[in-house]
Image (cartoon, rainbow, N blue to C red):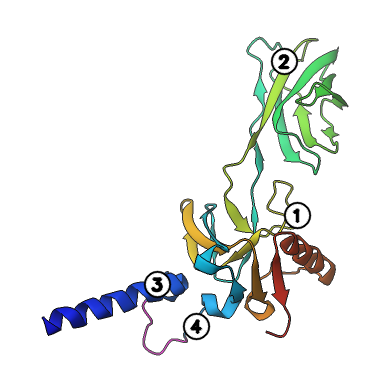
Amino acid sequence: MRKLYLFLTLLIAFAISQILDPAASAGMAAIAIGSTFTEPNYAADIILDEEEVRASREQVTVLHGQVLVPGTVIGKLIAAAQAAAAASGNAGNGTVTGVSLSSDFKVGVYAFSCSAAASNGGTFKVEDPDGDILGDATVGAGFTSPQINFTINDGTNDFHVGDSFTLAVNAADGQVKALDLSAVNGSQRAYGAMIAPADATAADVPGVAVTNRAVLKESGLVWPAGITDTQKAAALAQLKEKFITVRKGA
């Protein structure tokens, strides 16, 4: 009975340690003799104060293609542009490439319709998901707007009036990634900070982050390389909107 009691005590202590600091055991790797080991941040290195019952924490989905360490400041994806689709009856066989979103993008379907044909060229009317006209796109030249950017390329067969493309901008599934200051899909805004490592090299993986009502240590945060003081101040203001305060010198 005494051995059973001791075993249960140790088991409970281990379980509590995982709840208090999930980074303590996640992602730990074997250390080769003679190698240099750099100890990662733990939750206590990042969090000064948080809501009771871990209400400040959120289980997030980390977007594939990245490895996040504890303390990484993250953004949350809210939209993603899909590949443009040519209408099945198009006479021209050109393509749409170089698609990117601008800050005023809308979720929905954009439509490009050929309004003037020309040899090795043409002009397309661009409509946003609400039916508002954004302007004319010239075949072979980049089109830019406050919502969306792209290039319509000429093909071996010329476009005819009425040829068209559609391009869907879908709401994202809410994955997070390291703060990306050049993005326009939502990840350019600071959403929170990771408190456990997440290796999403091959696929989306679950992770744990502080995303509201907490006080964090500035020394524990990991920012994008090359971030300026102005950009960092803007990110800190975004965190403050979520009632996350970052304390300097802590």
Left/right of residue 240 with respect to residue 1 in the rendered view: right
Rendered image: mark on residue 92: 2
Can you name the residue that lies furthest to the left here? 1
* Residue 214 picture quarter: bottom right
Tell me the tag on residue 39.
4
Q: Mark 1 or mark 2: which comes first in sequence?
A: 2
- Residue 35, magenta (yes or no): yes
Give the camera-side residue of 167 and 60.
Answer: 60
Q: Position of residue 246 (x, y in %)?
A: 71, 73
Nearer the observer: mark 3 or 2; the answer is 3
Screen quadrant of the C terminus: bottom right
Mark 1 to mark 2 CA distance (whole Å): 34 Å
Asked if marks 3 and 4 touch (Cβ < 8 Å), the reply is no
Nearest to the eye among marks 4 and 2: give it.
4
Amino acid type of the residue that numbered disc 3 sits on in the rendered structure: Gln
Q: What is the three-letter code of the residue carrying label 1? A: Ser
Label 3 or label 4, whichever lies nearer to me, is 3
Dot 4 crowding, Cα within 10 Å, few <14, some 14–19, many 20+: few
State the residue position of label 1.
182
